[in-house]
Amino acid sequence: MNVESTQYFANTPSLIHVLVALLILGIGYAWLVRRLRRRNPSHGYTAFLVVAGDLLVATGFAFVAGAQMAVLLVLCMGAAGVPMIVEYVDDHLRDEEKKGGLDI
């Protein structure tokens, strides 16, 4: 472990502020997602809602670790997440076709 890896925790008040802000945003975001799911449980937006939530986390991370580290985090999440998004959209469209809701 190098010295740079511990620098993020040196400014604990800022870290605490970011964590509290993310907690509050997470609660509000969960409320919004629940409302969408209640209106239409098979809305087909879940993957994109996850991406938006991840971007909120990456924004908070940028305040703690810096923009360069946040960009690296987003790139890592994107590399792992894009195949999942493609699979989710394909699965959702296949379900809609089976229900007769799409003409593809």
Image (spheres, rainbow, N blue to C red):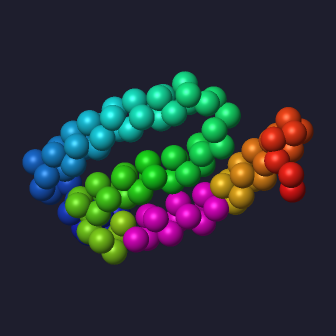
Q: Give the percent coordinates (x, y) of residue 30.
A: 42, 33
Residue range of the region highlighted in magenta in the rendering: 71-82
Judging depth in this view, the residue of 78 and 96 nearest the camera is 96
Quarter of the figure with the N terminus: bottom left
Query: Magenta span has 65?
Result: no
Q: Give the percent coordinates (x, y) of residue 33.
A: 47, 35
Taking the image as shown, residue 37 lies to the left or right of residue 12, namely: right
Q: What residue occupies the far top of the structure in this picture?
A: 38
Q: Give the percent coordinates (x, y) of residue 47.
A: 60, 48
Instruction: Tell me the residue at 86%/44% (across/down).
Output: 97
Residue 86 quadrant = bottom right
Taking the image as shown, residue 9 lies to the left or right of residue 52, namely: left
Instruction: Tell me the residue at 36%/66% (across/down).
Output: 70
Residue 7 quadrant = bottom left
Say if 100 sits above or below 15 in the image.
Answer: above
Say if 62 sits above or below 35 in the image.
Answer: below
Judging depth in this view, the residue of 7 and 64 nearest the camera is 64
Say if 63 sits above or below 75 in the image.
Answer: above
Instruction: Tell me the residue at 14%/57% (across/down).
Output: 10
- Look at the magenta stretch and give its main secondary structure: helix
Q: Is residue 12 visible?
A: no
Quarter of the figure with the C terminus: bottom right
Q: Is residue 34 visible?
A: yes
Instruction: Tell me the residue at 34%/74% (across/down).
Output: 68
